[in-house]
């Protein structure tokens, strides 16, 4: 498998892709996702775990709202991983992850994830290289456990934006009243660590790739939403789900 | 306050209410709910707890899908209460309820709830009258705690259908392939206990009314959805929420 290197992947939609046609396609996919989710719930044989990673302001929240916002809330839930609590820190780093894994029939979205334990932690020197290697091995094992022992389909998305796009979006948060609540003064300092982040992300993609990563060019939201919705659709469609008959 | 008696309340929409106009109104409310939810998340000062109770096939799942299905999944989650697990039974009956209460900024929907502990349990004789009285006192106290100590708005809905409507819906589950997965052979036996249920429901409504109950005529889904959406809208609107400015 060719090595992933973020710096060589475009953050933009290809020029020949039509915005309005793509948005129409996404709308159509979202309608069909509704029925696929209904089957997922009814069959209760498979689970879907969607892992969303990306730098600050890469559009994680928006992707969740716009791709998963029309599904039945009974069958989808979002877990946003923040800095671990004292109790979480008194366990292994996958303890809180495992607890949040989706049950059969359910779609669970991780807004950030176990990958932060080999990303932000490395960037700030809270996790050394040897520990990071051990963690990535454990992550692969955990993803295998979920896949093989609970029929969990795992989709991992990296929302790929350019540093320039990030700066624009962070600036917007300082003066758009509807976005100010998202502003965190720390984000600008964190943005300066861009290259370090990219290096550790690259390593993640190449080491934790038993379940493949999808690098989503995300400078344009409509393209990002289309790609994510398509992957979710393809994944659920492949399950060839059917409504179960009457329980005897 | 006048005593609630379900038997004297219609399960149908008033005859002079126009179905299409009402559906259009609901659509409009749902669009506005989206913005109100965004404010709820941004402010993170208030929480909303929606308790949905009703007999089998009264349309609880559908109400959740159709009223809350277009909200941002990052800010809404559903907790379906089933028969308690062994671990839950080794705690007080409100232990699992409290754990599932919404955080500030969040909307939590209870699909069934703590009220089952004074409903199904009484119908089947697993909970005697004296215990039920003590439980209802504890429920009132818990609802007061959530309301006064976490700014939780609590909306309690009873989806009111007629026994005839219920029979039709249960029958449908035995022959509609898209609904068979919901069929439970036990439902028909449970339906025979209708009058007992109504009596205990009436008692709940009159005893646990510090936070008022909304009895929702639910034989027609469009009317049910309109009433629930309206109440949610009114409740959030009254909070006069505003986007917070920049954190200093």
Image (spheres, coloured by chain):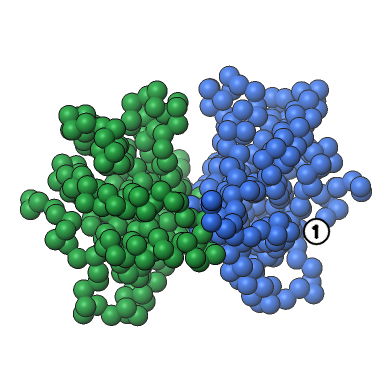
Chain colours: A blue, B green
> In which quarter of the view is residue B232 placed?
bottom left
Horizontally, residue A59 falls left or right of residue B127, namely right
Q: Which residue is mark 1?
A: A10
Q: How many marks?
A: 1
- B80 and A159: which is toward the camera: B80
On the question of residue A165 being in view, the answer is yes
Horizontally, residue B177 falls left or right of residue A146, namely left
- A152 and A184: which is toward the camera: A152
- Estimate how packed mark 1 is, as few (under 14), some (14 to 19) or many (20 or more) residues with alpha carbons within 10 Å: some
> In which quarter of the view is residue B233 placed?
bottom left
- A199 and B195: which is toward the camera: B195
Badge 1 marks a residue whose secondary structure is loop
Horizontally, residue B95 falls left or right of residue A19, namely left
| A27 to A136, vertically: above or below | below
Percent x, y for residue A220?
A: 68, 63
The residue located at (63%, 72%) in the rendering is: A28
Horizontally, residue B40 falls left or right of residue B9, namely right
The residue located at (17%, 29%) in the rendering is: B130
> In which quarter of the view is residue B126 placed?
top left
């Amino acid at each position: 498998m060719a090595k992933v290197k973020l710096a060589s992947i475009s953050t933009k939609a290809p020029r020949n892709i039509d915005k309005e046609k793509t948005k129409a396609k996404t709308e159509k996919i979202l309608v069909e996702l509704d029925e696929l989710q209904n089957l997922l719930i009814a069959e209760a044989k498979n689970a879907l775990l969607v892992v969303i990673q990306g730098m600050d302001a890469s559009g994680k929240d928006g992707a969740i709202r716009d791709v998963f916002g029309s599904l039945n809330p009974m069958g989808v839930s979002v877990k946003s991983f923040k800095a671990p609590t004292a109790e979480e820190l008194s366990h292994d780093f996958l303890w809180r992850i495992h607890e949040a894994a989706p049950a059969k029939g359910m779609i669970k979205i991780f807004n950030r994830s176990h990958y932060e334990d080999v990303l932000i932690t490395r960037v700030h020197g809270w996790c050394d290289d040897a520990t990071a290697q051990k963690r990535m091995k454990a992550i692969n094992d955990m993803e295998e456990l979920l896949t093989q022992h609970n029929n969990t389909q795992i989709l991992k998305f990296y929302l790929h934006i350019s540093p320039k796009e990030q700066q624009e979006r962070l600036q917007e948060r300082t003066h758009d009243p509807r976005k100010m609540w998202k502003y965190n003064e720390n984000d600008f300092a964190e943005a300066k660590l861009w290259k370090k982040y990219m290096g550790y992300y690259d390593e993640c993609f190449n080491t934790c790739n038993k379940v493949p990563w999808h690098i989503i060019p995300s400078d344009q939201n409509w393209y990002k939403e289309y790609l994510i919705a398509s992957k979710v659709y393809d994944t659920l469609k492949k399950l060839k789900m059917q409504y179960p008959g009457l329980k005897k």
